């Protein structure tokens, strides 16, 4: 694992994909990562495979990192490891609104994109749990938006 630096590709941690997400959408999901502690880069939700990174802040809250762009820390969401996350995402290129357990914030930036030209499967959500983690879903609803 250390030599390859690709442990999640070896099937040693849970990885979940929701494929073929639309290029403009609203998504409402309820899920949780069940694990004892954070590990480097885990657990994480990638909105667009390897694009917009959504993960935990140490001590509570979440972080949003735009591809080749800024990172935003949102401790006010109070998101905690092991607890249910009620997540609402509204996306179109250049703009994303992320709501976490009732705390919502909009991000408008040229780096807001889910398009990864290297990903042959197209836009998707990627959940990566990390070691000794379970990813549990209660519901996932996804709507395509017309521009």
Image (spheres, grey):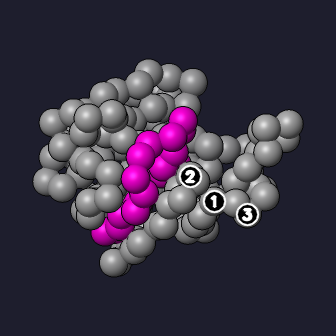
The crowd level at tag 3 (other Cα within 10 Å; few <14, some 14-19, many 20+) is few
Looking at the image, residue 96 sits to the left or right of residue 67; the answer is left
On the image, numbered disc 1 is attached to which residue? Answer: 13
Instruction: Quote the CA–CA distance across marks 1 and 3.
Output: 6 Å
Q: Which residues are magenta?
A: 29-46
The answer to whether one can see residue 69 in this image is yes
Looking at the image, residue 4 sits to the left or right of residue 45; the answer is right
* 94 lies above or below 69: below
Where disc 2 sits, the SS reads: loop
In the foreground, 113 or 9: 9
On the image, numbered disc 3 is attached to which residue? Answer: 11
The crowd level at tag 1 (other Cα within 10 Å; few <14, some 14-19, many 20+) is some
Magenta stretch containing residue 93, yes or no? Answer: no
* 7 lies above or below 17: above
Magenta stretch containing residue 30, yes or no? Answer: yes
Q: Find residue 5 and report its horizontal and vertical position in percent.
A: 77, 39
On the image, numbered disc 2 is attached to which residue? Answer: 130
In the foreground, 85 or 29: 85
Q: Residue at x 73, y 49 (%)?
A: 7
Q: Residue at x 47, y 27 (%)?
A: 110
Looking at the image, residue 7 sits to the left or right of residue 3; the answer is left
């Amino acid at each position: 694992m250390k030599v390859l630096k690709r442990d999640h590709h070896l099937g040693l941690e849970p990885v979940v994909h929701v494929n073929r997400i639309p290029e403009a959408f609203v998504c409402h999901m309820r899920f949780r990562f069940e694990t004892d502690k954070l590990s480097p880069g885990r657990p994480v939700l990638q909105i667009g495979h390897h694009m917009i990174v959504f993960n935990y802040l140490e001590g509570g809250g979440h972080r949003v990192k735009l591809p080749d762009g800024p990172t935003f820390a949102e401790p006010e969401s109070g998101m905690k490891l092991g607890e249910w996350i009620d997540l609402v995402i509204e996306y179109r290129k250049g703009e994303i609104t992320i709501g976490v357990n009732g705390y919502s914030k909009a991000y408008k930036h040229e780096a807001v994109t889910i398009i990864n030209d290297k990903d042959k499967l197209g836009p998707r959500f990627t959940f990566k749990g990390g070691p000794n983690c379970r990813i549990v879903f209660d519901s996932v609803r996804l709507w395509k938006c017309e521009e």
